[in-house]
Each structure stands twice: as structure tokens, then as C-alpha cells.
Amino acid sequence: MKKIVIKMGTGILSAGEGEIHSMRLKKLAEGILALRESGAQAILVSSGSIGLGMGKLGLLERPSELSLLRACASIGQCLLMNAWSEALSSVNLIPAQVLLTRDDFNQRTRSQKVQETLNSLLQRGIVPIVNENDSVSDEEIKFGDNDILSALLASLGKANMLTILSTAKGLMTHPIAGTLIPFVAEITPAIEQMAQGTTSPTAVGGMVTKIEAAKIATKSGCAVFIGSGEQQANLVEILDGKAEGTFFAPAGLELKARKKWLAFFPKAKGRLILDDGACEAILLNGGSLLASGLHEIEGDFEKAEVVTLSDGEGQTIARGISRFSSDDLQKILGKTNAEVLALFPGKNRPEVVHRDHLAPHL
């Protein structure tokens, strides 16, 4: 049975001033039921306790006084669990609260007990709702966030996917005027530089911590999805790799298994038409796509986006991640490796689509 860890940020759960987005929670509960009916188990990691407590106390900014933060967390935990109990009971699901700190992951015996508890709940059809124990732990309040907690849980429980829902659509090429990046094959320094911190007065992390969480989860063989939870999130579509947002390929898997994920990621942004030699190199020899084998380029796309590879008759043979934008590919169409590197001296490899980021059409 597939297992998915779903982390929800404060921004999608809190309606401000200590209020809950009850309808949004109900839709998420319906999504969890749909997951269950499709044969998948769900563990929730729910932020919001401190933000809800702040609202009840009339605080507009996150307090710096730790005792007041603990008080906010204590108030908010009651509100949060009451809201989840109501939402899940409306679809005949039973919630269970699990409060953790990072120490629970640092000691093997404690982490085993966490895993045993979660497995026992899931086997009985109960939905675990996990949160950091902010009401007693100063360190977690000052430095912790539920993005990292959700990644640790996904790694510990050998989840198939970690889904992080917030007010962000996903990873963008620029935080304001950028476009959505639908698929990340590998978390590189360039990907990390795209992430920006949050300005929300109730939140701790931002895209920076979400990328850190993705690094933890993907290294353990878990796929990651980052997307918006403001609209009704179709959790089944997310698990199937068909939702709008950013998918991160699991890096901890063997190469053959990791390539399988490419077939599930969002719609390709362009098409590359190849000559017969390039098709043969890819299909028969497991080779990379070189510029010398490019015959035609269709569509407008940026570097690191998903493209379809086709033969001269228009038949799709593979999907892959382009190392060049469509504009740059026009400049190197049919050129040799030496010519490609001469045109782009900043690159140390000439491949258009490296074989590690290329998967034959299924």
C-alpha cells in the first residue's frame, strides 16, 4: 500500500484572528478519504497551532518571548485538533494527535517507537495528525518548522511521496514575476538559489525550508510535491504525479527506478525531433541526446524543463529534461560537441538531454 505524508502550512489552515478555514479542511478530509479508497495511507503534518493561538490572543506579530510562544502553541493545539476532528469525522475518519520534537528522530529507540505508533494507527484506518511539540520545546519554536519534520517522517516511514501544501504554487523561476517549474530532476545550487524566505508574520519557513525538506526526502527515495493548498487539492492526482505544482524526483533510488518517475511528471513544455542516429543511440544504446542529432525544435521552454523526444515521423520515443532553453537549442541545432561548448563556455558538458535524465516512452 502506498504511503503519502501531507504537510499543510499555516497559511492554508488559518483564516486569521484565531479562525480556521473549516471548508478547506473539509475538502482536505474528503481528499484523504479518496486516497484511502484508492489504496493509499496518509499521515498529516499540520502547522497552524501558534498562528491560531496568536489570533485568539490578539497578537499581530509572532512573539519573540518564548514563554508567550509556548502559550500560543498550547491554545492553538486545542483549536487545531478540534477543527481536524470535525473535518475528518464528517467523512467517517478518526484522527489521532502525535506531538514530536527533533529528539524523537535523533535516538534510534525513540524513532522506532514513533514508527511503530504511526504504523499501528494506519493499520487501524486512523489518520495520524503530527505537529512539533511547540508548547514545551524552545528549540523547536526558535529554529524548527514542520517542513523539515514532514521530510523526516517521510524518510522514517519510507513514504512514497511527501506533499507540501502552502500558499505557494510551487517552485518558481522568480518569486514574483517567474514561471512555475513543474519538475526538478536534481536539487542543484541553482535550484536552491530560486528559493526565497517567507514574509508571513505567523510562519517560520518558506520556500527555503521546503527545498531543504525536499533534499532530505528525495535522498531517502521519496518523491516530493510542492504546491498550493488554497484551492481544492486533488490528493490522488498529486500521488499520481498529475497535479499542478513542482515535483521532485527521488534521488535515493537506483537510476533505473528513478527514471520511471519521469513518466508521471507534468505535461512536456516542448518537443525535440531527432534524426535516426539519435533515436538509435537513445533506444538501443542508452545514450544521451546530443545537439548533432537534433533535427527540429517545437515549443518555448526554459532550461531544466520537461520535453518530449520524437523520431522523424512524430512518434514519441522518450521524455527528458533539457539542459538548454528552446532559444539556446536553436543556436546549437545539428552542431558537434566541440561547437556547443565553444558557444556556451560556461557549460562543462555538451549534452542536450543527459541519459540520467532521460526515460524511454512507456
Image (cartoon, grey):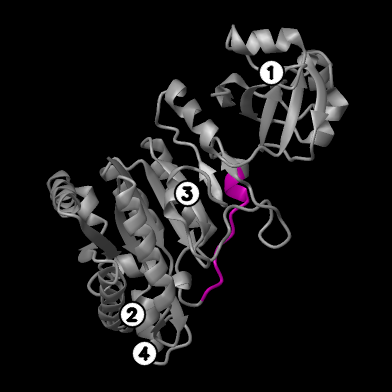
Question: Which of the marked residues, 1 or 3, is nearer the chain's N terminus?
Answer: 3
- Helix, strand or loop at label 4? It is helix
For label 2, the residue is: 69
Question: Which of the marked residues, 4 or 3, is nearer the chain's N terminus?
Answer: 4
Asked if the magenta segment contains residue 356, the reply would be no
Question: Which of the marked residues, 2 or 4, is nearer the chain's N terminus?
Answer: 4
Residue name at image x 67 percent, y 29 percent: 308
Question: Which percent across, then down, holds residue 312?
Answer: 77, 16
Q: Amino acid at mark 1?
A: Leu
For label 3, the residue is: 237
- Res 88 → quadrant: bottom left
Mark 4 surroundings within 10 Å by alpha-carbon count, few (fewer than 14), some (14 through 19), many (20 or more) = some
Residue name at image x 34 percent, y 58 percent: 32
Residues at marks 4 and 3, CA–CA distance in whole angstroms: 36 Å
Residues at marks 1 and 2, CA–CA distance in whole angstroms: 54 Å
Question: Which of the marked residues, 1 or 2, is nearer the chain's N terminus?
Answer: 2
Assign the magenta stretch its main secondary structure. Answer: loop
Q: Which mark is residue 289?
A: 1
The residue lying toward the viewer, choosing from 166 and 268, is 268
- Helix, strand or loop at label 2? It is helix
The magenta-colored residue range is: 191-200
The residue lying toward the viewer, choosing from 281 and 238, is 238
Residues at marks 2 and 4, CA–CA distance in whole angstroms: 13 Å
Residue furthest to the right in view is: 331
For label 4, the residue is: 56
Relative height, residue 69 to residue 6 (above, below): below
